Image (tube, rainbow, N blue to C red):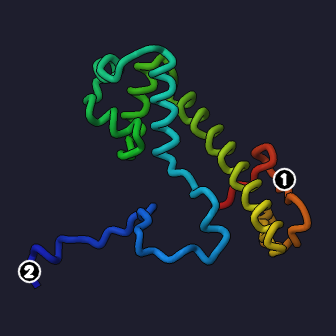
Amino acid sequence: MTSRTTNQADVIPLRPLPTAADPAPQDLSQDLPREPLWRDLVGEVLRRERRAQGRTLKDVSEASRISMAYLSEVERGRKEASSEVLAAAAQALGLSLADVLALAGERLVSLAAARTRSRSRSLGAAGGHRSARTAGGHRSVRAAGPVRPTGPMGGVLLAA
């Protein structure tokens, strides 16, 4: 084995791109929207705030001392920015890091709720069972109608 092959790692993409050769999905859950990545949500917040202020990428890049190329990558969800980079970008936009993270968190909760509603409709139409995770463990619920989870995040259960 050469040093060239020992230094290479297998990379497993988090969101593999579908190909024409992929078979049709057998599982209804594959038709549901995918869980968003945190970097996508944070980038979306930064871009939305920048555009709402009518500022250019170059302007925010200079104010935050982050390269324009890197800031663009962060906004598009291509790069996982450090907390220091996010704080600098937030400050350049007149926000705190907490503001950016709270806005991204609100978007995540909104998407999770939509995903739960979509899953409930899909499983209800198929007459299947729905598993709901609760603080005390797992339980199976017959999907006769929309299942409304309760929890500390305004009706959305977050599980690790």
Residue lying at the far bottom of the rendered structure = 1
Q: Which secondary structure lies at badge 2?
A: loop
Q: Which residue is mark 2?
A: 2
Q: Quick one: label 2 or label 1, which is nearer the N terminus?
A: 2
Q: Which quadrant of the structure image shows residue 121?
A: bottom right
Q: Position of residue 35 (x, y in %)?
A: 58, 56
The extreme right residue here reads 144
Q: Residues within 10 Å of mark 1 (few under 14, many from 20)?
A: few
Type of residue at label 2?
Thr
Q: Is residue 20 depicted above or below 57 in this figure?
A: below
Residue at (28, 19) in percent of width and height: 62
Q: Quadrant of the N terminus?
A: bottom left
Identify the residue at image location x=28%, y=24%. 65
Q: Which residue is mark 1?
A: 150
User: Considering depth in this image, is 73 or 105 the residue closer to the camera?
Assistant: 73
Q: Are marks 2 and 1 in contact (CB under 8 Å)?
A: no
Check disc 1 and give the amino acid type: Thr
**Cα gap from disc 2 to disc 1, whole angstroms:** 55 Å
Looking at the image, which residue is at 29% across and 72% down? 10
Is 80 left, or right, of 103 in this rendering?
Answer: left
Where does the image place residue 87, in percent across and percent down from the top left?
A: 43, 30
Q: Position of residue 83 (x, y in %)?
A: 42, 38
Quarter residue 69 falls in: top left
